[in-house]
Image: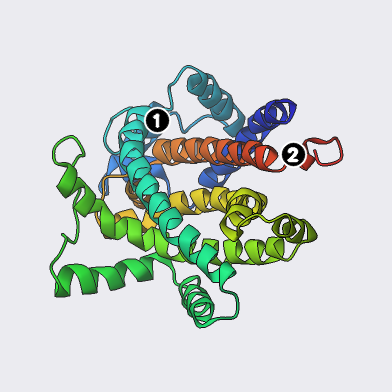
């Protein structure tokens, strides 16, 4: 509990620093959002008026303080491009991205855990070599490359699922899954490969420990030793990897959602960058920073649960 509170308190300076750096980089950008917003043929007076209305004519510190005050009340500004409140846009797109990440993470776990377990239990055998070879190959494949290959094979050649678009879960669950299966698979493949290698390595190390031999000497069945002792002890590094992968899934969604034209958080981020929509960019960075820090905190708490030794003052 104490460690969780410490992690929670550490969120504040991290998020504040990330937001400050983001606003500084946006201010140093050579592109003037007021000129973009005013249009190509706008006069200098019109650009100045737009800059004033958008609040771009004040110093960085003032903008930073005003933004923080607004953020505390749930106001992240208004999009230059759409005129919608940034928080509303983020909330609507996070629903789609959350579904995509959830499906991708479920695929990752369902594929990686059985294969990693089988490879570790059959170390040195042909099935272990096959799993290691395939996972070593897939771990270096970027998500966007996997997405393009899946589109070519599954959608264009086989015609099994649509190439792009999104259907709401409440409208049609079957079409919803078919609209997410390819982008989720593209995100899950490299992450599952990494998790397989991590789980296999952890289990191989745990199965060689003395306490495992002691449990086997007591007459416990192999599946009991593996399920009750080996898997639990190997879970700690695996959970850490899963936590890091959640952050990578959110990052990878930016490109994958753009490829599959999904109305998600990543696609909105890409559009905001192209249109120099500073309020949306700032809101995206703020929400992303909070999500990543919270995910890391949850991973730390889970690691404490699976490894009580970390609860000691030295471990903390």
Outermost residue, front direction? 219
Q: Quadrant of the N terminus?
A: top right
Residue at 30 percent across and 40 percent down: it is 38
* Residue pointed to by mark 1: 54
Residue at 79 percent across and 60 percent down: it is 210
Q: Can residue 265 be seen in this snapshot?
A: no
Residue at 59 percent across and 66 percent down: it is 200
State the image coordinates of residue 296 (x, y, percent, origin top left).
61, 41
142 or 182: nearer the viewer: 182
State the image coordinates of residue 185 (x, y, percent, origin top left).
34, 60
114 or 198: nearer the viewer: 114
**178 above or below 122?**
above
**How is this picture coloured?**
rainbow
Dot 2 alpha-carbon crowd within 10 angstroms: few under 14, some 14 to 19, many 20 or more: few
Q: Return the disc, 2 or 1, that comes first in the chain's sequence.
A: 1
* Residue pointed to by mark 2: 308
Q: Which mark is residue 112?
A: none
Choose mark 2 or mark 1, whichever is in front. Answer: 2
Q: Quadrant of residue 261?
A: bottom left
Contact, mark 2 vs mark 1 (Cβ under 8 Å): no
Q: Quadrant of the C terminus?
A: top right
State the image coordinates of residue 46 (x, y, percent, origin top left).
32, 35
Q: Would you say 156 lies left or right of 15 here?
A: left
Spatial separation of the CA atoms under disc 2 and disc 1: 52 Å
**96 above or below 225?**
above
- Which element is circle 2 on? helix
Q: Would you say 259 lies left or right of 201 here?
A: left
Q: Can residue 282 be seen in this snapshot?
A: yes
Q: Would you say 168 lies left or right of 268 here?
A: left
């Amino acid at each position: 509990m104490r460690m969780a509170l410490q992690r929670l308190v550490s969120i504040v300076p991290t998020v504040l620093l990330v937001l400050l750096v983001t606003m500084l980089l946006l201010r140093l950008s050579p592109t003037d959002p007021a000129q973009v917003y005013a249009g190509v043929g706008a006069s200098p007076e019109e650009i100045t008026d737009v800059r004033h209305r958008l609040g771009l004519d004040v110093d960085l510190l003032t903008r930073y303080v005003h933004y923080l005050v607004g953020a505390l009340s749930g106001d992240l500004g208004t999009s230059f491009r759409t005129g919608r409140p940034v928080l509303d846009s983020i909330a609507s797109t996070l629903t789609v991205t959350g579904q995509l990440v959830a499906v991708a993470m479920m695929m990752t776990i369902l594929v990686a855990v059985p294969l990693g377990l089988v490879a570790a239990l059959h170390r040195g055998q042909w099935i272990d070599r096959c799993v290691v070879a395939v996972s070593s190959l897939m771990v270096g494949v970027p998500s966007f490359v996997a997405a393009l290959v899946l589109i070519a094979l599954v959608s264009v050649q086989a015609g099994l699922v649509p190439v792009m678009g999104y259907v709401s879960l409440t409208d049609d669950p079957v079409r919803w899954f078919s609209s997410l299966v390819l982008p989720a698979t593209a995100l899950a493949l490299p992450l599952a490969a990494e998790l397989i290698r991590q789980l296999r390595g952890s289990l191989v190390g745990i199965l060689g420990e003395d306490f495992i031999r002691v449990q086997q000497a007591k007459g416990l069945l192999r599946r009991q030793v593996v399920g009750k002792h080996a898997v639990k002890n190997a879970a700690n590094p695996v959970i850490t990897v899963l936590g890091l992968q959640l952050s990578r899934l959110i990052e990878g969604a930016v490109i994958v959602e753009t490829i599959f034209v999904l109305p998600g958080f990543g696609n909105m981020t890409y559009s905001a960058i192209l249109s120099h929509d500073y309020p949306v960019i700032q809101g995206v960075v703020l929400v992303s920073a909070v999500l990543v820090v919270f995910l890391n905190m949850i991973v730390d708490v889970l690691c404490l649960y699976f490894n009580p030794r970390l609860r000691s003052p030295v471990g903390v």
